[in-house]
Image (tube, grey):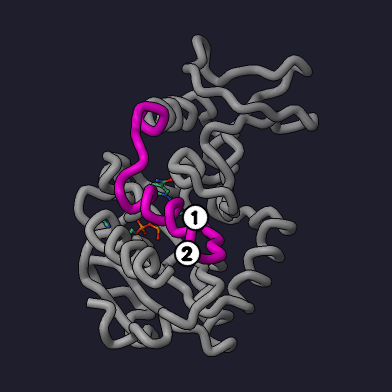
């Protein structure tokens, strides 16, 4: 499976993963697009925008509370676990579009959350923020300052946290291998990260059962799921050491 790129893999020191919703699909968290994707049942512009939120904060919160309950109950899958284990053998950074925290729960120590966290809540006005795993009794929840609280996720039309994005580019720019796992690469600017890696002549590997717009730019595409393939990759590195 990795044979065509094995020599380059063996030399690699810095490995960057770019992960998306497909990474957590085998943990029982639906993806956005594709078969059974969340967007099949909801119009994103009615749910995941600041305008939609102010128009109907209760509806948006109800949708997020369902997702929060599902995510809190989910467990990291063998794909998440294998990425965490890879840290024993190589320098590993995870640049994730996921908001579920499963990489961290699997034990990965260097995770940059490009789109925030569904478990973190912040005030729409003051600087309050906190991690909350329990459900709220009343929706929308209200901050001590009297204003509405919101999930600390990046909605459509909102910029990424600038410090996180700058750091993500620096890692993408300097890695030896980039593994793009479980993302449709349709969401900008996260989908530009492989281009930074390519400029640095990094080896690009895609793990996704389906084609993406950037599949043709990859050195290797593996049409398989994350939990089937990433443990095999970690096994290769464990045998090199
Ligand atoms: P997406 O839904 O657009 O695409 C998911 C991709 O994963 C598809 O290309 C699909 O073919 C692939 N896939 C499905 N199952 C897979 C598996 N088991 N292994 C490997 N690949 C698999 O997701 P995206 O590209 O991350 O889209 C962007 C947005 O979705 C992000 O903004 C992200 O915040 C959000 N999102 C996050 C979560 C989460 O945190 N778990 C869940 C849904 C959506």
Mark pair 2, 1: CA separation: 8 Å
Camera-near label (2 vs 1) is: 2
Q: Return the x and y of residue 69 as percentages of the image width and height.
A: 39, 25
Within-10-Å neighbours for mark 2: few <14, some 14–19, many 20+:
many
Which residue is pictured at 41% across the width and 28% down the height? 72
Q: Mark 1 points at which residue?
A: 97
Comes first in the chain, label 2 or label 1: 2
- Magenta stretch? 70-96
In the image, the residue with mark 1 has its CB under 8 Å from the nearest atom of ligand 1: yes
Which residue is pictured at 52% across the width and 12% down the height? 138
Along the viewing direction, whichever of 103 and 59 lies nearer the viewer? 103
Secondary structure beneath disc 1? loop
Q: Return the x and y of residue 14 as percentages of the image width and height.
A: 56, 72
Q: Return the x and y of residue 196 as percentages of the image width and height.
A: 58, 80
Q: Quadrant of residue 142?
A: top right
Within-10-Å neighbours for mark 1: few <14, some 14–19, many 20+:
many
Q: Is residue 112 visible?
A: yes
Q: In which quarter of the image is residue 19?
A: bottom left
Secondary structure beneath disc 2? strand
As displayed, is residue 198 above or below residue 92?
Answer: below
Along the viewing direction, whichever of 105 and 19 lies nearer the viewer? 105
In the image, residue 166 lies in the stretch drawn in magenta: no
In the image, residue 75 lies in the stretch drawn in magenta: yes
Drawn side of residue 23 relative to residue 135, left or right: left
Q: Return the x and y of residue 136 as percentages of the image width and height.
A: 51, 15
Along the viewing direction, whichever of 177 and 237 lies nearer the viewer? 237
Q: Name the residue under label 2.
A: 18
């Amino acid at each position: 499976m990795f044979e065509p790129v094995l020599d380059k893999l063996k030399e690699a020191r810095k490995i960057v993963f770019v992960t998306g919703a497909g990474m957590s699909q085998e943990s029982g968290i639906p993806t956005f697009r594709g078969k059974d994707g969340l967007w099949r049942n909801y119009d994103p512009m009615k749910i995941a925008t600041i305008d939609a939120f102010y128009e109907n904060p209760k509806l948006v919160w109800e949708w997020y509370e369902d997702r929060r309950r599902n995510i809190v109950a989910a467990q990291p899958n063998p794909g998440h676990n294998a990425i965490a284990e890879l840290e024993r053998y190589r320098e590993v950074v995870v640049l994730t579009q996921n908001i579920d925290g499963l990489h961290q729960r699997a034990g990965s120590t260097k995770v940059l959350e490009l789109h925030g966290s569904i478990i973190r809540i912040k005030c729409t006005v003051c600087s309050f923020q906190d991690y909350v795993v329990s459900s709220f009794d009343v929706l929308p929840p209200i901050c001590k300052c009297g204003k509405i609280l919101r999930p600390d996720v990046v909605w459509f039309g909102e910029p990424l946290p600038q410090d996180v994005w700058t750091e993500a580019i620096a890692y993408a720019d300097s890695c030896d291998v980039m593994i793009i796992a479980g993302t449709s690469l349709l969401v900008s600017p996260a989908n530009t990260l492989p281009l930074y890696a390519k400029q640095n002549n990094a080896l690009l590997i895609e793990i996704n059962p389906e084609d993406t717009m950037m599949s043709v730019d990859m050195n290797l595409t593996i049409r398989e799921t994350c939990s089937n393939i990433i443990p095999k990759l970690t096994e290769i590195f464990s045998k090199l050491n």
